[in-house]
Amino acid sequence: MTDTLVVARKELLDLRRDRFMALLLGFILVATTLSVIVGAAQFRIKLDEYDQYVAALKASGSAVSAAAPQLFPLQLLRGSIEYIELIGGLFAIVVGYGMVAKEKQRATIELLFSRPVRRYSVAGGKVLALAITWLVAVAVVFTVITGVLLIVGRAPLQPVDIGRLLIAAAVAWAYLLLWSSLAMALASSTKHLSTGLIAVLVLWLVVVLIIPQIGDTMDPDNQVPGGLFKSLQVAKPDEHAVLAHFAGYDTVRNGLEVSSVTKHFERLSFAFLGIKDVFNQLPIAAVARQTLAYSLSLVLASAAAVGLALLTTTRKTLLRRNS
Amino acid sequence: MSGFRATLQQEVLSARRERMPQVLLIVFLGMVSVSSLIGWLTHRTVTSVWETTRAAGLTTAPNPFAHAASLSYVKNVVIYVVLIGALLAIVLGVSSTLRSRKSRTTDLVLSRPVDVAVHLGAKLTGMAIWLGAILAVAGALTWVSIALIMRGALSAGDTIRLAAFFGVAWVFLLVFVVVGMLSGIHSRRETSALLLPIVAWSVIVFVLPQLGTAALPVSLLNPVAAVPVEGGAFAGVQQIVGPFALGEQFKTLSGAALGTGSPGSLGLAAFAIVTALAAGLLVLLGTRRDHLRRDLRD
């Protein structure tokens, strides 16, 4: 077995035994599951209201018909994706930070490097363990929420939906690996562990919460409950024509939003799951074409974070900083 | 100098020196400073959109911001208190008790005839004073930024409203300081001490409101409290979990203080936040002496 695999195996064993890790993953699982249940319950209320409306129409002898609310099962996953986006990112930081912090706190890093390990074996093993951990975690979360969709949501899933779910799971995996690798890199490269934790937590706050929130706030349509254009009774084509006058403002607003990798994760997941109406029921290939820029940026950002973790978690950095 | 005063002064001094709260403090004050600008820019754009729509004959509806409260520019500060302020409060609370445990000063202090409740009360008072000073600075920044935007001083009424809002924010944030202190006292590891209150914050800010209102997590980053869904089991669930969704209760109180309006009962909101603080204080001040000194046995 190579050094890398030995380190990865040890890390996986540690993570499996860590009760705190189990608590974090359990929390994510509960939050994402509850979100699907809430979404399904809300849809059932809409359906009941529709049935009552139709019954009232029939009773009044009206010949007018109304379109029934249509269930697109994957749209019920919106809240779950948002939980992975907000809370999942934070937990990924904790896991990535813990990989280096425990070695520094227990002073096992000196012991580890007293062995003839290759330059990137320790970092490689830790990153591999992170990748496997998030693969298992994402697989469990998506399996459970798919089960909840089928049982509680009574949502019939087509084979293409499974494909969409697998892509969304892969996107979530890349996003979580990004945050874990970044936390690992910062914990390794800073002299004090707390400095690394501060840096990555502030980064999370800014990238995950503040930038998207500013972008959302600056959207004129979000300024009035139910939407500005709906309140002004302006039709969609006219809305686009009006907004064309504010292209500069919207470019700044959108530029702010897309400066956050979290928005790339969100837009990509929402597109593949059909949560955004413009992508709903589009073939996967068409969605992939239209969201290529987001896919590339997420993959590149994750690869860069992994690369940074590999380059910073070395004997030279860790032992020099500790001395 | 009494033990209470010495602990209090030490707490304020340490809070000022801690790096993690300092960074969060800079982010918080930075966002408070620019929030009025963001609010003003958005208001101006919405008004321009309305003017363009009206000029094109597409609407006859009145300008949605025609009667907006003068403090509506700062309504985003509400969400920065819930997001950054609460995290800052948690970090302050955790750092306070964890610092004493790590440096073993708690063991030393409690080897003297010092009452545990007085010791912890002094620490909390120190935090409360520090937090009060931070919010006073945030309030002053907000006042100045609105005055600059409106090119004139705020009226006495608006100044009182702003002060009331930051007063409510102070009480709300104290709840998280107490939660952080409790976590610092009871957690075995530094990471779990910091993370457990953040998990609790996630539950309070995202999970509980979603259960009662079906609002999506990202939409809960809106400064206006979510409206419960009518029908189904939502009303019942909201009655049970709603009072514990302190973030939403704070939004309700803030809406009333700023005059921007937010759904929900003011009485319930005030009761929920004050009760949460009282319950937290009861648990904190009831901490046993041997529990605080347990590190001596480990």
Image: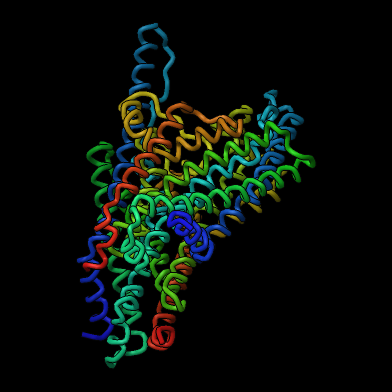
Q: Position of residue B263 (x, y in %)?
A: 50, 28
Q: Residue furthest right?
A: B151
Q: Which residue lies furthest to the top in this view?
A: A60
Q: What scheme was used to colour the molecule?
A: rainbow
Q: Position of residue B196 (x, y in %)?
A: 33, 55
The residue lying toward the viewer, choosing from B51 and A8, is: A8
Q: Residue furthest bottom?
A: A116
The residue lying toward the viewer, choosing from A15 and A156, is: A15
> What residue sits 53% from the left and 31% below the top?
B262
> What residue sits 47% from the left and 50% below the top?
B125
> What residue sits 42% from the left and 48% below the top?
B176
Q: Where is residue B13 in the image (x, y as percent from the top left)?
A: 52, 62
Residue A21 drawn above or below residue A60: below
Residue A29 drawn above or below residue A100: above
> What residue sits 43% from the left and 52% below the top?
B122
- Tell whether A297 sits left or right of A7: right
The residue lying toward the viewer, choosing from B58 and B156, is: B156
Question: In this orientation, does residue A56 appear?
Answer: yes
Which image quadrant: the N terminus of chain A?
bottom left
Q: In which quarter of the image is residue A151?
A: top left
Residue A235 drawn above or below residue A207: above
Question: In this orientation, does residue A207 appear?
Answer: no
